[in-house]
Image (cartoon, grey):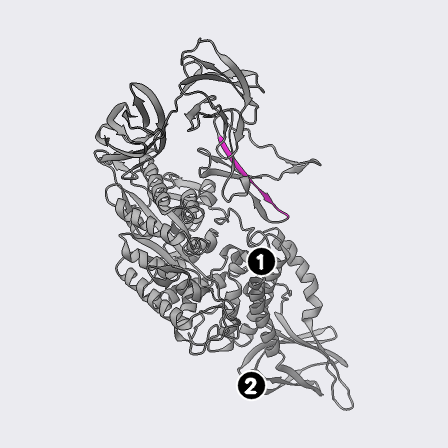
Amino acid sequence: MHYGIESGPQQAWTEIFNVAMKWNGQNFSATIGPFANGTWIAWVFYDNTTGQWINYDNHPFWNWNLEVNPPNLGQTYATVLQNGSILITAIGRAPDEFDIHYGLTTGPQTGLSWSDITDELMTYNPLWGNYTIVIGPFSPGQWVQWVYHDLTLNQYYHNASGQNFAIQDVYSFIQYINASYNRYVYVEGQPANVTIYLQNTISQAINSLISIQVAGHVYNLSSTLKPGYNPLSLTLDTSQIPQGIYYPQLNVYVNNSLQRQAALPPLYVLNITGKKPLSLVIVWNMHQPLYVAPNGSWEQPWVWLHTGQDFNWNGSLVGAYELQALLIKQFNVSVTIDFTPVLLYQWETILHEKNYSFTSNFGINPNHDISAVNYTINLYRQLINEGKVDVLTVPFYHPLQPLLLQDGYWSDVLAQIRMGENFTHEVFGVWANGTWTPEMAFDMDLVGLYNESNISYTILDQQGFLPYVTLVSGSLNPDQPFIVENNLGQTIIVLFRNTTLSNEFGFKFFSQSPQLTAQELIQQLAEIYMNNPGGVVTVALDGENPLIFNPTTGPADLYAIYQALSQYQGQWLITQTASEAIATHKPYSVITNLPVNSWDLNLNYWNNGYPGKTEIWQNVSLAREYLVAYTVTVGANISPLVYLPLNETPNSTNLVDTLWNYLYVAEGSDWTWQTGPPANGPQWFKEQAILYTSTIISEVKQQFSLIKLQSAKLDGNNLKLSIYNGINTTVRLLLVITNGKQQIQLPIMLSQGQNDFKIKLSNASSQLQIALYSPVSTSQVGLTLIPINSYGFLIAQYQVTLNKSTSSMVTYLLTLIGILIGSAIIIVIMKRGNI
């Protein structure tokens, strides 16, 4: 059970907990708390066996919600529906049986006699934490009174005045259709034009009085309603309405008789006097993993298609990345974008490769897509130069950094960070001072690495981190930049994304009508402004996925978002890049002890014990161990900053750098994300990761096989060895000779070709063991599958029999890998299962 404390139903969680539930033979159960009365609790479930989240009604990001012993028991919302039924919603103590006891009366006053008395159980709604029921329909003008009866407590509830609840069932030949305002939000003093749509269902025109009540003011309009639909317009004076969210009451009278009541849509009014505007920072994460195989062939089409062939927009075929740039250019907005270097690498490959190889007919139109890539890159360069786009860097292949750090691969993380910075600069000509942390997966050790790389800020998830931090100074108001400090005094600035609003961008705003998206966005921002004017609200999410997954509605929704933001910018709202927001909102709150976490509230999506994920991580560890051993052997640098010629993707100019690039590819987060539950992505993702790691292992094995002991001869007290080096460079090894109980260790360098050595050996036995090691240390390798001993990584081991009459030998090559790999895998599975 994954649960948290919230300020209201479906709101952001401020404290987050997990508890294992117990099976009693019929169901799972858990006891949590105690909690203070009035505390809102939300929860979902996580199946640790399948790795699947279980949300309310199987809807992403819907929770079960409950208020503990609500202090406002009986609080009611009631409205008359068009057919004369009454919808009643009330606050009760869940999960009690909550009954409505109602009857028909002649007025609203308590004490009047009731008729047709009825009791019905109300239904608890876990999404909003309330009870609901629809009663009726009743005759026009009928008064209905009721109270609530908690059958569990045997307690009745009346309204706040101790009276019965009452409503008049007003419905008639005049039907209320809907209403709209000319703006989503008003600043005090702006005229609010409201248009109301009424239907006259009879065949003759009628004279009516339209009355709107809001904030203690009444606005009237006399109108003749023609048969059919009638749009009516009134203007509300917001200078008389204090800041707040109002639900104006509509009353329609005919011949002084009330014929229709309705609650109009919410009216948002802001007071901006002496207040700073709200700063909205939108951060788009533009990412695709490497779809190119080691042999250079394109195995998936998505970089091509998502740049040039996703939608028809204004008569042109465009991709998601191109559409984003076009709309940013069109509207008065500023945004922050990270282009993962692996995406940029593939764009540049498309532009520089001469001969393209595809493993299938993907429907790619090379000429069109090449043109789209070129246009898209140049358009983003223009937007960056104009200051409309702030570019973040990203570790090159989008690795899950905390797991790499836990396994001791610090130098790999640092190399990917620096390669990402360099490639972003190469493409866009700017040195990014902020970074997108892949999967928002953070570890406090990253503060030092980011400092070392001249990175000053990043973006993390509010819900996943902020409830668990230690506050050093300042406040935990989420709408501000924070200073994150480690135990060495190193710092980095963090903007915490508004989890609720970011999820609405990702899972709601791109799948509904553009007008509704724009309205909900602006009104939510206005509500934040009411509570925290001058704050910084950060929205961060994938930049292409909401468009790609909603190809019908997504483009128009993005247009509506940018259009609305452009329209409302100025008095109370501005869009800023992350750098601008940090510059204008000087960070003052200092926090530390951020947990190891991600946007997903843990790291299980990438490492939950599923065999396929475990296999990928094991292969990464094994490949890295081989590669470090080979790198040390040939005297190269571990975790190099790899040079990547753009017409040789994914290869570098030498074998060592090429193999390190392969390893960085395999460290990307996409492979384990897509493999197995809960994503259950295509099998190809696992195969791509295994392909790169197995290529490293097989290539290093082949290189080591070129180093051979050719002969061993005893010449008096000297052992003469001839070792052949078939690698095309000088290698450095540790030679270990075991002569009975005597052991000789000798660092050696092998030039290309045959190398002869004379080693003093006293009292030589007839059986010698000769081993060649790559002189690596455990600190260089990190997590190992093949144990590293004090000599290093065993390359080859020979059993030598010395024949005294001929001084000849017989050698036996022992392959160490097969001997040790089985037990090593068991150890690693256990270790990773506890991460």
Name the amino acid type tagged 2: Gln
Q: Is residue 665 magenta?
A: no
Q: Is residue 47 magenta?
A: yes
Q: Residues within 10 Å of mark 2 (few under 14, many from 20)?
A: some
Q: Which residues are magenta?
A: 40-49
In front here: 187 or 263? 263
Q: Residues within 10 Å of mark 1 (few under 14, many from 20)?
A: many
- Residue 547, given in percent of the width and then of the height, sits at 42, 55
In front here: 569 or 793? 569
Name the amino acid type tagged 1: Thr
**Mark earlier in primary sequence (1, 2):** 1
In front here: 428 or 415? 428
Left or right of residue 271: residue 638: right
138 to 707, vertically: above or below: above
Q: Which residue is mark 2?
A: 752
819 to 259, vertically: above or below: below
